[in-house]
Image (cartoon, helix red, strand yellow):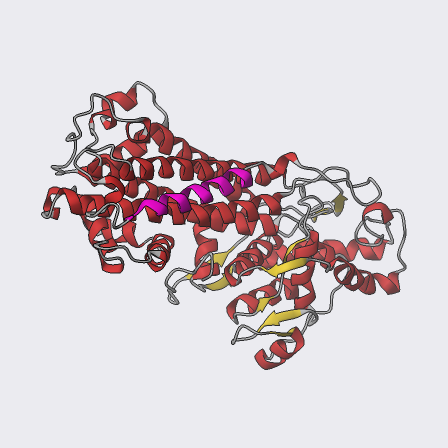
Amino acid sequence: MKTNSPRSKDFHSNVILDGNSLTTHDVLLAARNHARVDIAASALEVVRSGRKSIERILKSGRSVYGITTGFGKLADKKVSENQLDVLQLNLIRSHSVGTGAPLEEDEVRAIMVVRLNSLLRGNSGVRVEIVRQLQEFLNHGIYPVIPRYGSLGASGDLAPSAHLALCLVGEGRAFDSDGEQVKTSKILERARITPIKLRAKEGLSIINGTQVMTGLGALLVEDVRALIRNLDIASAMCIEALGGSPVPFESRVQKLRPMHGQAHVATRILKLLRESKLTETSGHVQDPYSLRCIPQVHGAFYDALQYARSVIEIELNSVTDNPIVFPDSDEVISAGNFHGQPVSLALDLLCMAVAEASVYSERRIDKLLSGYNSKLPLFLTKSPGLNSGLMVTQYTAAALVAENRILSRPASAENASVSAGQEDHASMGVTAALKARKVVDLTNTIIAIEMLCAAQALDFLTEDKKKMGQGTRIAYRELREISKPLINDRSLELDIERVTEALRQDRFTRAIEKTVQL
């Protein structure tokens, strides 16, 4: 099963790129819904202006890094005018040294959207033909093979981006409609797309920048948003299953500690539990932290998400290659916008937040299975001893939590010095994104287990599901459509997979929001 399955496709939507207003949701539409990508006419004029600046610089005979020189430590090596085009082709060939399994289709599409949008700012100096080629790839569904490992996240995401650039010129490999890797030239011939011939600076403009970590980050932001909503739903079901109290969620409590995420989550939980007859039945004076502190803990996850979204959306509309061209003055400045530290830190924060969400979810699984609510049998089975019930689902959850804890170590705290010491600090932004992706996938599975346990507990507590809250009874109904109650022991592997996939598809939230405005 794909770890980041596309949501249902909406072929009627389109995304208009102008270099300034791209959002994470737009990226998701283009990457997973295969929305058509259009380019604003005004943006094309900006691109033409940027290219004219490069052409004036070439005519002047000036020595300018990345345009008439080598790269990195070779910046002092002047390249003759008749070899400038060869220089750009050599650049992408030499940098196409990524390794590992290819990135998924939605990830590659996200990367192409981010690169295209940045080039539309006109500060990269490429021709209109380059942005049109990226647009053609997106709208024809051409999916380059981009190995996932090789980027250090400084000087841009060079190696993976070079594999993309290689396909634009008709080299490298891409996937055909059957998912087989074939020569890009064959796919372009079939689609009647002419390979691009790179001109001065264009190869560097395509590969130098944070488009890989930012494209992956945009999808992560959207997926974590869905994950946190699902976490709220699962926890509301647990509050009912464990007879928890809704009192700690009252607005007057949240106002005394005005964290935005805390108030937001508390309000959502109360909406999910509205009309519930199953709360405050455990007989405990105080609920455990895994119930009572849901607004504070889930709220912190929500605030981390909002920060990561703000960073990613700034980066989506930024110029992050080097050198940067200023067409009004024909100045070319070598600077450091390619350094991915802001994105890497944000993705590490997102990764840690989701890893901690998995810890919190597993603690509620423990409460559901261990007899905390005296009305529930141990391990949620009618015949303990003969049946083990849901006992070992916690083992799986705990194993995934352990892996998440290991993966939550910050990638942004790592470093490497390369290019003979010229590039002596790296952000490891793509590493941060890849780790975060795995943590999101594992945490969705843990939340699926939590929901399965909560639904099983609710089956023991009441036959009348109308006693559940407005939102939780809808979530229960949706879950029971894909996973039946556990009467006698059976393998739950497929049940976990089905519920996990439903979480990725945001099925529960979409069903609830038809009735309850969350």
Q: Is residue 516 visible?
A: no
Determine if the magenta segment contains residue 265: no
Q: Quadrant of the C terminus?
A: top left
Residue at the outermost top position: 256
Determine if the magenta segment contains residue 404: yes
State left or right for residue 265 relative to residue 39.
left
Q: In the picture shown, does residue 308 fall above or below 53?
A: above
Q: Residue at position x 20%, y 25% from top?
A: 247
Count of number-bearing discs: 0
Instruction: Tell which of 107 and 179 is nearer to you.
Output: 179
Q: Position of residue 227 (x, y in %)?
A: 38, 45
Q: Quadrant of the N terminus?
A: bottom left
In the figure, residue 345 lies in which quadrant?
top right
State left or right for residue 187 relative to residue 29.
right
Residue at the outermost front position: 386
Q: Residue at position x 19%, y 44% from top?
A: 458
Instruction: Tell which of 247 and 60 is nearer to you.
Output: 247
State left or right for residue 161 relative to residue 307.
right
Q: Position of residue 39 (x, y in %)?
A: 52, 61
Q: Position of residue 73 (x, y in %)?
A: 85, 46
Q: In the picture shown, does residue 167 fall above or below 264?
A: below
Part of the protein shown in magenta: 388-407
Instruction: Tell which of 393 and 135 is nearer to you.
Output: 393
Q: In the picture shown, does residue 212 fall above or below 280?
A: below
Q: Main secondary structure of the magenta part?
A: helix
Q: Is residue 281 visible?
A: yes
Q: Position of residue 123 (x, y in %)?
A: 66, 49
